[in-house]
Image (tube, grey):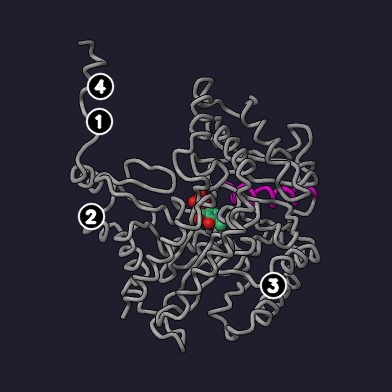
Amino acid sequence: MPWCDLLMTIPMTRSSDDLRRLGKQFLWHPFTPMKLWAETDPLVITSAQGMHLIDSDGNRYLDGVSSLWCNVHGHRVPEIDQAVRAQLDKVAHTTMLGLASEPAILLAERLMKIVPAGLAKVFYSDSGATATEVAFKLAAQYWYNVGEPQRNEFVGFAEAYHGDTVGAMSIGRMPAFHKPYFPMLFKAHFAPSPYVYRSETPDDPEAVKQNCLAALERILEEHGRRIAAVCIEPMVQGAGGIIIQPAGFMSGVAALARKYGALLIADEVAVGFGRTGRMFACEHEGVRPDLMCVAKGITGGYLPLAATFATQKIFDAFLGEPWEGRTFYHGHTYTGNPLACAAALASLNLFETNDLVAHVSRNATALAGMLDRLRPLPHVGNVRQLGYMVGIELVEDKPSRKPFDPKQRVGAAVCQQVRKHGVILRPLGDVVVLMPPPAMDVEDLERIVEAVRAEVAELR
Ligand code: PLP
């Protein structure tokens, strides 16, 4: 028997126990308390089909968090699989430094047709954090290039999250994640975010909005000519706890940035590509950012790709002779990876053929009806939803909004329990997050919500 046929007879997979043991021996998981991890029996995902993840024991689970907020059409989608295979038959990777690449060009052309008006150029990178870093650097260098180098400070929002690199942590400073690094972060200003449920006037979103906008305006008034850009997650602050902004907040922020001459950076990494019921969340309020960041869903959740969009005016400020120092000297090895671009193009085709954005906004109404069943439960403090982004905030005492002791890890416990119902979820503290793939249908949404309802009802 030839050696390659012989190889085929050797099983390539290991037993579940083996995989768990090896994983614990060699892996360091992101955002994971590893001591606790070592004491658990993690699921090992070995395959997937449609909306389901399948573990090494053959159990099936609905992917209720879109494999960390990125999957769009489900898994093993024939059209995307085929597009990636076809690209593999051409080339897997070539550099964009000094060379152009076909899929990167075709994807850029396609993206320009759907992004908010005014955005004219796309700069690729490979993750949400790199997309936001690029935006911050573009903003800073834009002002440098146009002769206002003093505009090098940023305004972000409390509890915002823009990724885990230094620039992203500086402007999206989440104490729970980033405290050890505070001394090495650069200066930024923070406006309060309109977290209505945790505000002093939880029944008056309008007042919360006005207070937060007034606070932002005070910062801009005080530091106006030093501010390069205001950066915001449009409509929904994701990792902060699925904090949905009151109507008019996003457009209010955009208006204030304009008024004080700062650029507006929209971080659409989580909210982009249909998840809120619009292709991009900026569309809800007709906001036109100067810079916009996307990642996660751009490839349908298949491969790492990110993009930072800029207006023509910003792009033009970088034009000049090489020795003039106006060039954007930034890039990553896998920038604009052809396989990822091919997946993204196939994903955008599916958005069109399946009218996916309309599907999300239609089903979001049905989802809202399902979520209403959770509201009366004694430990459900607040249910927040925009499109397919849902946060269910669990509290110990509903009338006073008193949180559970974080050591109880109630959110994590509920997410562990829903696995019995064949559902995978991941919480943010005691906010149970539902982030189904935009293509999920009503029946599967119903299964997820019912699993959560059953387990939250058990909380004592
Ligand atoms: N920006 C936002 C709004 C996000 O939600 C995230 C990740 O959750 C990021 C940036 C960082 O993306 P990545 O994990 O791909 O670096």
Q: Residues within 10 Å of mark 1 (few under 14, many from 20)?
A: few
Left or right of 239 on screen, residue 220: right
- The quarter of the picture where the N terminus appears is top left
From the image, tell me which residue sits under label 4. Answer: 8
- Mark 2 or 4: the one toward you: 4
**How much space separates mark 2 and mark 3, taking CA atoms?**
46 Å
The numbered mark, 2 or 4, whose residue comes first in the sequence reads 4
**First in sequence: mark 2 vs mark 3:** 2
Q: Which residues are magenta?
A: 131-146
Q: Position of residue 76 (x, y in %)?
A: 44, 38
Give the crowd class for mark 4: few <14, some 14-19, many >=20 residues within 10 Å. few
The residue carrying mark 3 is: 216
Between the residue at mark 2 and the residue at mark 4, the CA separation in whole angstroms equals: 30 Å
Q: Quadrant of residue 194?
A: bottom right
Q: Earlier in the sequence, mark 1 or mark 2?
A: 1
- Locate the C terminus by quadrant: bottom left
* Image marks 4 and 3: residues in contact by CB distance under 8 Å: no
The picture quadrant where one finds residue 158 is bottom right
Residue 79 in sight from this viewpoint: yes
